[in-house]
Image: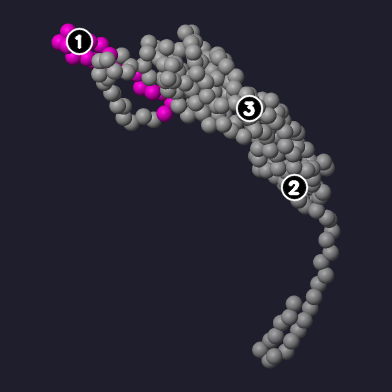
């Protein structure tokens, strides 16, 4: 410390500060990656007085099952504190999405979607008469990502479909995708000779307009 008074006199003084207590040793180990549905325990190796995690926990150890950078601040009996962090990456299977359900040239439902990386296979699900989705086929990695449902009859009934994927890293299956439902158009001849058209809205995409085309007798 240096001071100068009104007369220009200078005075100096100093003090040595010695650290009485070092910071506590707080470690969590190396960053880690593991498969979905599993978890790990993050534990502060030294037993201290208090702990505060960025998850809100205040225990010496916590269970980690979500991709996140976990940080803990630990305090010892001398009120000295230190912190440590560890990144946890959980491999979660990607939920695929159907691109479109349309009608094939053979007048069957065609389900198509874009392929994703890291996928071992896709399961195509179809809603049955009991409103339960069941797997109707499996599309393996490298195959064309489309499926023609030969059991369908889109001219008579609408069907609902969904996708799931199995990842190649952990062999875990994803949740089901957004459900897509095909359109079923009905044309009913009225007593006055006019034709009434009725259809169910396409499910799975936001469709703002529908165009109805009328064929000419004798033409395909």
x then y, percent, for residue 78:
80, 51
Neighbours of disc 1 within 10 Å: few (<14), some (14-19), many (20+): few
Neighbours of disc 2 within 10 Å: few (<14), some (14-19), many (20+): some
Q: Nearer the viewer, residue 38 or 181?
A: 181
Q: Earlier in the sequence, mark 1 or mark 2?
A: 2
Residue wearing tag 3: 141
User: Looking at the rendering, which quadrant does residue 52 occupy?
Assistant: top right
Residue at 20% across / 10% down in the picture? Answer: 190
Q: How many labels sit on residues? A: 3
Residue at 77% across / 81% down in the picture? Answer: 12
User: Looking at the rendering, which quadrant does residue 102 occupy?
Assistant: top left
x then y, percent, for residue 46:
83, 42
Determine contact: label 1, label 2, CB under 8 Å. Answer: no
Residue 200 visible to the viewer: yes
Which quadrant does the C terminus fall into? top left
Q: Nearer the viewer, residue 168 or 107?
A: 107
Q: Is residue 154 left or right of residue 37?
A: left
Residue 57 visible to the viewer: no
x then y, percent, for residue 97:
52, 29
Which quadrant does the N terminus fall into? bottom right
Residue 60, compared with residue 216, is above or below; it is below
- Foreground mark, 2 or 3? 3
User: Looking at the rendering, which quadrant does residue 118 occupy?
Assistant: top right
Spatial CA distance of label 1 from label 3 is 50 Å
Residue wearing tag 2: 84
**What segment carries the magenta color?**
187-205
């Amino acid at each position: 410390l240096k001071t100068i008074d009104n007369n220009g006199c200078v005075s100096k003084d100093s003090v040595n500060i010695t650290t009485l207590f070092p910071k506590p040793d707080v470690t969590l180990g190396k960053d880690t990656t593991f498969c979905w549905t599993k978890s790990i325990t993050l534990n502060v190796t030294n037993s201290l007085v208090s702990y505060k995690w960025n998850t809100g926990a205040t225990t010496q150890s916590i269970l980690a099952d979500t991709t996140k950078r976990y940080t803990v601040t630990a305090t010892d009996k001398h009120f000295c504190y230190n912190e440590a962090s560890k990144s946890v990456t959980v491999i979660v299977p990607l939920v695929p999405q159907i691109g479109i359900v349309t009608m094939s040239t053979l007048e069957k439902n065609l389900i198509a979607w874009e392929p994703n990386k890291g996928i071992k296979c896709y399961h195509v699900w179809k809603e049955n008469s009991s409103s339960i989705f069941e797997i109707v086929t499996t599309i393996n990695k490298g195959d064309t990502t489309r499926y023609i449902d030969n059991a369908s009859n889109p001219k008579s009934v609408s069907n609902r479909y969904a996708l799931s994927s199995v990842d190649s890293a952990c062999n875990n299956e994803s949740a089901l995708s957004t459900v897509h439902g095909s359109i079923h158009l009905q044309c009913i001849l009225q007593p006055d000779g006019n034709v009434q058209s009725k259809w169910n809205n396409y499910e799975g995409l936001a469709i703002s307009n529908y165009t109805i085309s009328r064929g000419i007798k004798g033409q395909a």
